[in-house]
Amino acid sequence: MQIKDMQYKRPDIQKFKSAMDEITENIKQSASVDEILALREKKLNLGRELNTASALCSIRYTCNTADEFYEKENDFWDEISPEIQNIELNYGAALLNSPLRSQLEKALSDVYFRYLEIESKAMSETIIPDKIEENKLVTDYTKLMSGLEYEFRGKKMSRPELAGFFKSEDRDTRREAYQVLGDVLNENKEQLDDIFDRLVKIRSDMAIKIGCKDYVELGYYSMRRVSYDVEDISKFRKNVLSSITPVVSRLRTENAKRIGIDRFMFYDDGIVVKGGDPKPVGTKEDIFNAAHDMYHAMGTETGSFIDMMLENDAFDVVARKNKCGGGYCTYIPDYKQPFIFANFNGSADDVDVMTHEAGHALNAYLTGNNRFADEIGCGGMETAETHSMSMEFFAWKYINNFFGENSEKYKFMHALQNLSFIPYGTIVDYYQHIIYSQPNLTPKERCSVWKELESEYRPFICLDGIPFIEDGRRWQYQSHIYEAPFYYIDYCLAQTAAFGFLLKSLENYDDAFAKYMALSKQGGEKYWPLLLNEAGITFPFEDGALSALSSKVEKIIESLVC
Ligand SMILES: [Zn+2]
């Protein structure tokens, strides 16, 4: 069925609640494993119905934020989501505390119960009001940021439009664009500080109320981290500092010289290819055709996947007024249908939509019938991003169809930017660890923390010249820090796995792709470390784990210099 024909209906939450309460109560009373398993099936049906409505609302709202009906529905979902989380929590607790638990674990899986345990630690009825308040503060931030206007060279524009100039080949243009960004954000810095301060306080309060040491602990539970802990991430940071930062510093400094830059400034970070970023050739239709051919060439399953996506019109990629920015992939469970949202702008990002976002969509398609598809999905976010980021590299074999004569330039840019991303993403994550373990830092102290991390992880970049940046405020337009705490490191972890797949694919493409597909199909069944192990990909937490990877990727990048 085409997405546009899928009907949205606001669910009756009271009905959902009483049905769920009944299921939970019956699980508590039950003395039969089979009966509990049947109750779980009932719960899955209710959940699918709810998530289908929620996904359809979110799709329609983000595609047109001026639609009054879906704006109201969107508010409804914002308000109701902590309550739903709590209802699910009671259901999970009934399974966890069941006297039949060990038999249930055998019938389902220990991975499934580990997820239930983590979720039970992340939520409690006592924090529902705080969660609602947190959602409101996040909305305040989103509204503030999306409402800001930037006047650049006499023209008023949005931040995504202004950001186009951060990649200009002309250095003065880049500097001026950042100057405009810094000036506008500086005018709003008190508000940005205030919203964040209140978020830190409310998140820290919730952590204490729920019995955690601090929000770092609660944040990990909220992210459903089952595969690694704070200690592992600390080891990962060491690996980034010893193996990735030196290579990125060297590559970026040398590359800057090639472009004619002697002192690498903050506003030079967006440019890696002399003559400007390579752009895809052809129209939107050409990109869709190239994607169609690529997924068919990759194999039968990927071919059926892309046919299904095109047939059901599961894309909205044209940029227009009143459409949200950015891109995402979501899933409509009742129809087992992935959906891809993007804003094509003629840059290489348009191709990422067909590789990265379609990588997520492919995964949802491959795991739609898995037994834990509705509850665990493909696994953690690090696993989801492993699917999408690796697909970006598997697309290299077919990249000619998208970039024509610019293909080598694209590969160079893609690899160098993605490697450079790892130290940046690590800063974003480390920053949050520090902030939430010392919640009483002043806004000024928080900015000093950011600046120190920049000089440690990205020592090649000079932050002077743009007041907002110079003051250590770069994090204030990194929306994840406000909106999705502790999410960011998963991109970095997945990036190392994706580079692992790139190296494998250059040795033996078919074998690497078969391993990738095998990994992609196991959503919800195995932990990320085991999945990596089966695919022969290095686990990034061991001592020195990134050293060989980093030097091999450096050689690839050097071979692509253009
Ligand atoms: Zn992604």
Image: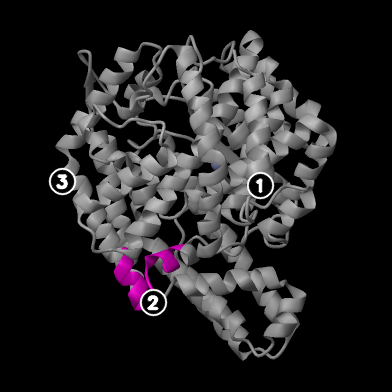
Horizontal relation, residue 226 to residue 509: left or right: left
Q: Residue at x 77, y 30 (%)?
A: 506
**In x, y percent, where is residue 483?**
37, 50
Question: Can you tell which of label 2 and label 1 is closer to the viewer?
Answer: 2
In the image shown, does 299 or 76 lie closer to the viewer?
A: 299
User: Does the closest atom of ligand 1 sit within 8 Å of the Cβ of label 3?
Assistant: no
**In x, y percent, where is residue 51?**
53, 56
In the image shown, does 225 or 73 lie closer to the viewer?
A: 225
Q: Residue at x 74, y 24 (%)?
A: 397
* Amino acid at the residue labelled 1: Ala
Q: Report whether residue 87 is seen.
A: yes
Q: Secondary structure at mark 3?
A: helix
Residue identifier under label 3: 190
Q: Report whether residue 73 is seen.
A: no
Distance between mark 3 and mark 1 Cα atoms: 41 Å
Residue identifier under label 2: 210
In the rendered view, tell whether residue 325 sits above or below residue 23. above
